[in-house]
């Protein structure tokens, strides 16, 4: 008899511990979340899409995540096409919200970027435009997420934000697709040089691409040899642009020197050979960019030339040279 009582007591004790689980999936009846509650985030690694958005300091063009590129995952998790999902956001059948990863739940915060987006502070928390360092906005027309950072962002910004689409079944958001987006503002490709251009008419100082290979690799994802091969073709994807004092690229001037290159006046503005005030040239040579001088310039003359090599198809890929010159 005592043995039976002991077994019963042990069984009750075990059941008592089981009932204390705080995992929503362990509950006999799942909690139904009301409109003012933040539903928990059901763990599902296969529903998470990781995306890294790297912006270059001084040229922070927005980046776009086209949802059609993830149509298969959306179909698998939501049983919807991308068009159906966007239509669901319009009708209320699908919700588009932030996800608070620290608390493991959805965040129903009101939009702070347009009508379908949010700003985030340096900790990845929802913020407004005055304190935000990055933002995500849903473009329903383009069926895309648009990612951006402020134009004046300094290198070193690093923040992660999570947003998701979920079916609103009136109980939970268990059927969802999530975007885990990492933002970073970097400055790996700014090369500052102090050079002395040798004496002699049309003499030049040659900056070797091999000497800045790490910057080329970081900015273009290629070796200096591969980069050199591309810049030998003036009609290719990589262009040279001069940069003014305000940091604006001169993308409208045609090349005025040999190959990919320009003749410049004393302030670094594009001009042509023989024009009054022509003083320098920058030319792409085989394996180098040459910084040269016009005839008749006085020894000791100092100047500053600012240029970029940039991809025509993706302007976020560029390498920048700030060159302080002295004539021998």
Image (cartoon, rainbow, N blue to C red):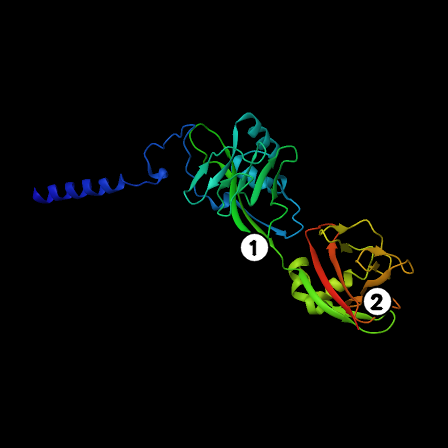
Relative depth, front residue between 174 and 316: 316
Q: With respect to residue 210, does 249 lie above or below?
A: above
Q: Please say whether residue 83 is visible from this viewpoint.
A: yes
Horizontal arrangement in the rendering, residue 218 relative to residue 202 (left or right): left
Mark 2 lies on residue: 293
Looking at the picture, tell me which residue is in the foreground, 176 or 102.
102
Quadrant where the N terminus is found in the figure: top left
Mark 1 or mark 2: which comes first in sequence? 1
Q: Position of residue 96 (x, y in %)?
A: 53, 34
Q: Secondary structure at mark 2?
A: strand
Residue 86: percent from left, percent from top: 59, 32
Q: Quadrant of residue 201?
A: bottom right
* Residue at the spot 52% in from the left edge and 38% down from the top edge: 164
Residue visible at 79% across and 66% down in the picture: 291
Q: Which quadrant of the structure image shows residue 210?
A: bottom right
How many labels were placed on the picture?
Answer: 2
Mark 1–mark 2 Cα distance, whole angstroms, equals 37 Å
Mark 1 residue crowding within 10 angstroms, few (<14) / some (14–19) / many (20+): few
Does residue 238 show up? no
Front residue (pair 324, 123)? 324
Secondary structure found at label 1: loop
Q: Quadrant of the C terminus?
A: bottom right
Closest to the observer: 70 or 285? 285
In this rendering, the answer to whether 95 lies above or below 179 is: above
Q: Residue at x 46, y 43 (%)?
A: 44
User: What residue did someone put label 1 on?
Assistant: 156
Crowd around label 2: few <14 · some 14–19 · many ≥20 (10 Å): many
Going by the image, does 157 lie left or right of 295? Answer: left
Q: Closer to the camera: disc 1 or disc 2?
A: 2
Spot occupied by residue 205 in the image (x, y as percentages of width and height): 78, 70
Q: Is residue 25 above or below residue 303?
A: above
């Amino acid at each position: 008899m005592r043995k039976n009582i002991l077994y019963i007591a042990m069984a009750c004790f075990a059941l008592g511990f089981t009932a204390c689980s705080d995992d929503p999936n362990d509950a006999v009846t799942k909690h139904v979340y009301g409109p003012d509650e933040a539903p928990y985030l059901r763990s599902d690694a296969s529903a998470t899409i990781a995306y890294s958005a790297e912006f270059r300091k001084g040229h922070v063009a927005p980046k776009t995540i086209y949802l059609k590129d993830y149509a298969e995952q959306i179909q698998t998790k939501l049983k919807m096409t991308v068009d159906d999902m966007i239509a669901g956001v319009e009708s209320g059948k699908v919700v588009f919200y932030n996800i608070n990863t620290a608390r493991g739940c959805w965040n129903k915060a009101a939009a702070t970027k347009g009508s379908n987006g949010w700003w985030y502070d340096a900790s990845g928390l929802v913020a407004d435009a005055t304190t935000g360092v990055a933002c995500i906005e849903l473009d329903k027309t383009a069926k895309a997420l648009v990612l951006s950072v402020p134009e004046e962002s300094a290198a070193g910004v690093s923040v992660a934000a999570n947003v998701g689409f979920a079916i609103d079944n009136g109980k939970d958001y268990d059927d969802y697709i999530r975007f885990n987006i990492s933002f970073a503002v970097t400055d790996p490709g700014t090369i500052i040089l102090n050079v002395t251009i040798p004496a002699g008419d049309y003499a030049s100082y040659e900056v070797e691409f091999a000497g800045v290979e790490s910057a080329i690799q970081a900015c273009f994802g290629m070796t200096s040899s591969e980069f050199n091969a591309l810049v030998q073709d003036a009609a290719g994807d990589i262009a040279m642009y001069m940069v003014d004092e305000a940091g604006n690229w001169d993308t409208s001037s045609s090349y005025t020197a040999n190959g990919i290159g320009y003749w410049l006046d004393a302030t670094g503005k594009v001009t042509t050979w023989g024009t009054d005030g022509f003083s320098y040239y920058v030319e792409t040579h085989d394996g180098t960019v040459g910084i040269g001088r016009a005839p008749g310039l006085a020894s000791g003359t100092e100047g500053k030339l600012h240029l970029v090599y940039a991809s025509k198809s993706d302007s976020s890929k560029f390498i920048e040279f700030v060159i302080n010159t002295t004539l021998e």
